[in-house]
Image (cartoon, coloured by chain):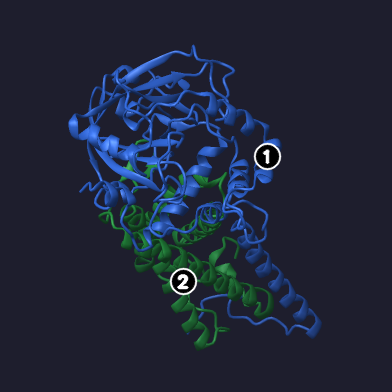
Amino acid sequence: MPSVSNRPRTQFATLSRILHWLMAAMLLSMLFIGAAMVSSLSAYHRLLAIHRPLGIAILVLAVARALNRQLTELPPFPVSMSSLERRIASVSEKLLYTLMFALPLVGWSMLSAGGYPVVMCGAFHLPPILPPSPLMYTVLREAHTVLAYTLFVTFLGHLSAILFHTFIVRDGILRRMLWRR
Amino acid sequence: MSIGSNSIASRSAPLSASSRTARLGLIALILGAVVAAFAFAGGLLRPEALTPSKMIDAFERANGEHAGFRRNHAKGVGISGYFESNGKGAALSKAFVFRVGRYPVIGRFAIAGGKPAGTDTPSSVRSMALLIKLPNGEEWRTGMNDIPVFGVSTPQAFYEQLLASAPDPKTGKPDPAKVSAFLSKFPSAAKASQLIRSEPKAPSFETDTFNSLNSFRFTNDAGAVQAVRWSMVPSKVPSNTPSAAPAGPNYSFDALIGAVHLQPVEWHLDIVLAQPGDPLDDATVPWPADRPRVDVGTLRIDHVESEDTSSARDINFDPLVLPDGIGPSDDPLLSARSAAYSESFTRREGEHKTPSAVSTTSGVQ
């Protein structure tokens, strides 16, 4: 792994890159597990058993990532990005961070409001964070779906921008998040 | 902005028009593949796949739509009491519920079927659903029926049975031709149906035996796994069993309410141990009658309450909410029950509630 140099960054810090790719894989898996789970009778239980602890792991990592984001220096945007593009990138980054927190928290609240035990693994489970409430359950269950679709669409936007910069603009923007220089 | 190094700042040579088009096409392809994969995962590209939503739609078609009620076992009452474990189950499972002690229970007695104001009949399938609260915060939820085996072995068979038994718009009754076509397509369902009809039926909730039907796996402290089914067996079968002659549309609930008001009603939880070769993935097949049974404790129901006020109304008695030490078998009905119950729960929790038929006609507060 590259060591930190004194020159201005051209890449994200190593921990930032690790967190980015780890969480990218986790979040994308969660979206697919969630979509498959609610539409499958046979796989529902097995997928739900993964969905809950994976969601809480994402919440924990989101905290670590937000702290890391505050504490590390970022590489500058490439000069090829217009100010509008930079603004869109900043807003979508904030949106992605918000969703990384919101989706697991809404999921946890939703299970609490529905009166379900929040089972993680074996006998380990989390306490409820809301009292049982049919109304809250209904609202949060719907919100969980809406937020998940929002995450998927935001991810598509993020992916489109990277693909466009990589294949059309060819400004090497992806290298900021890779290990190869 | 100053850039310390290399290629990030450098612009590449312009792309030819054809190369640009090809690259845009590649991008569109990648994005399209991601969207298609997501749609596939969500079942959008598999219209023939049986989903929880389709299953619950089938219940609504078969029974009519009854906002606020469970889509199956719609007519019921809330109960509460406790389960007193005698400790004998601890050798079989490390689940907290089998340690000696008393654990509070919330539950529900109901009649199978999706009509919340249906009429009780002597042949109605009765059910007992329980939520046992454990001191470490875990829960054991179980839904049991008073039939010896389940009517079908797969979710697909269950779905086709619902479709076959939906009332014909002309007669208002199931089409016998469809029912017999279903039974010949699913021989295990035909066999199960015979077995269910041949079993003598208890006259009332309080004298009834309730069976898990599906198989589960117990794991004990040493890690040993034992496949099981279980039954709630009534402690006392009254010598003068009440007449099964229906006296009103809610007669079986009225009798239950009367019995619990008189004195607490008890059941024993019998764990039935599978032997090698016993089917674990087919709830239509009974296990031989000589399988060892372990009485692990007593369920005591001392309170019965209308669903209008009971917290049982807003509990999903998902049979896969299990404490550590009890796990599912390979029975495909288990995950399907869990998924369909969840869909039914989500729909009814968002609907306006109307009073339960049992409370209005029996006057139970």
- Asked if B36 appears above or below B311 in the picture, the reply is below
> What percent of the width, then of the height, locates residue B114?
46, 49
- Quarter of the image where one finds residue B10: bottom right
- Dot 2 falls on which chain? A
- Dot 1 falls on which chain? B
**Apparent side of residue B118 relative to residue B31 in the rendered image (left or right):** left
- Asked if B293 appears above or below B134 in the picture, the reply is above
- Asked if A169 appears above or below B318 in the picture, the reply is below
> What percent of the width, then of the height, locates residue A66?
37, 64
- Asked if A54 appears above or below B8 in the picture, the reply is above
B72 or B361, nearer to the observer: B361
Q: Secondary structure at mark 2?
A: loop
Disc 2: which residue: A7
Say whether residue B162 is visible: yes
- Quarter of the image where one finds residue B137: top left
**What color is chain A drawn in?**
green
Q: Are marks 1 and 2 in contact (CB under 8 Å)?
A: no
Residue farthest toward the bottom in the current orientation of the protein = A83
A120 or B106, nearer to the observer: B106
Q: CA distance from mark 1 to mark 2?
A: 80 Å
**What color is chain B drawn in?**
blue
Q: Secondary structure at mark 1?
A: helix
Give the residue type at disc 1: Ser
Say whether residue A50 is visible: no
Residue at x 65%, y 44% (from the top left corner) = B176
B225 or B302, nearer to the observer: B302
**Apparent side of residue B349 relative to residue A77 in the rendered image (left or right):** left
- Quarter of the image where one finds residue B197: top right
Density class for disc 2 (Cα within 10 Å; few <14, some 14-19, many ≥20) is few
- Both labels 1 and 2 in a single chain: no
Disc 1: which residue: B180
Residue at x 81%, y 82% (from the top left corner) = B18
